[in-house]
Image: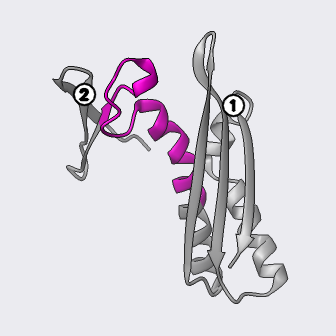
Amino acid sequence: MSVKFTGQLVAPQTTEIKHNSSGAIIKTTAPVDNGGDGSCFSPTDLFASSLGACGTTIMSLYASKSAIPLENIHFEAEKIMDTAPRRVAKIIVQYFLKTNCTEDEFKKLVAAGKSCPVKVTIQNVVQIQESYIRV
């Protein structure tokens, strides 16, 4: 499967990215600690938050497919940068699952979340610390 995106500079330090299939648009800008104004997501912010979005999506799909009751999921993510070279060194993500499922079903949801493609792609390059909390 292939998905295409296009991007262009729309203001100093601000890039607009288009998801070609849907037409959805997002913008990125440089973060304050790298000379930008921090007015929206930086590219590395999107990278780090993609882990939380991916885990959330995969758990939701698994719950739906497996008839596991799941009312909601939200996540909190934190990106920790390294300076030499400048890169994402660590992502801390907490998933909060609102569900009245059994303990066995909860373990299956967690396993699904841990298998998300973003995690599988970056886990050998970026340190990942994750937790799954039932609320």
In magenta stretch: residue 51: yes
Which dot, 1 or 2, sits closer to the camera?
A: 2
Q: Is residue 17 above or below residue 22?
A: above
Whole-percent x and y of residue 27?
27, 38
Q: Provide the residue span drawn in magenta.
A: 28-55
Whole-percent x and y of residue 121?
64, 37
Mark 2 is surrounded, within 10 Å at the Cα level, by few (under 14), some (14 to 19) or many (20 or more) other residues, namely: many
Which secondary structure lies at badge 2? strand
Q: Residue at x 32, y 40 (%)?
A: 40
Of the residues under marks 1 and 2, which one precedes in the sequence? 2
Residue found at the very far right of the displayed protein: 104
Tag 2: amino acid: Thr
Total count of labels: 2
How far apart in space, not on screen, are marks 1 and 2 (Cα)? 25 Å
Q: Say the numbered circle drawn on residue 14.
A: 2
Q: Is residue 1 above or below residue 61?
A: above
Q: Say the numbered circle drawn on residue 17.
A: none
Which secondary structure lies at badge 1? loop
The residue carrying mark 1 is: 126
In magenta stretch: residue 97: no
Quadrant that contains the C terminus? bottom right
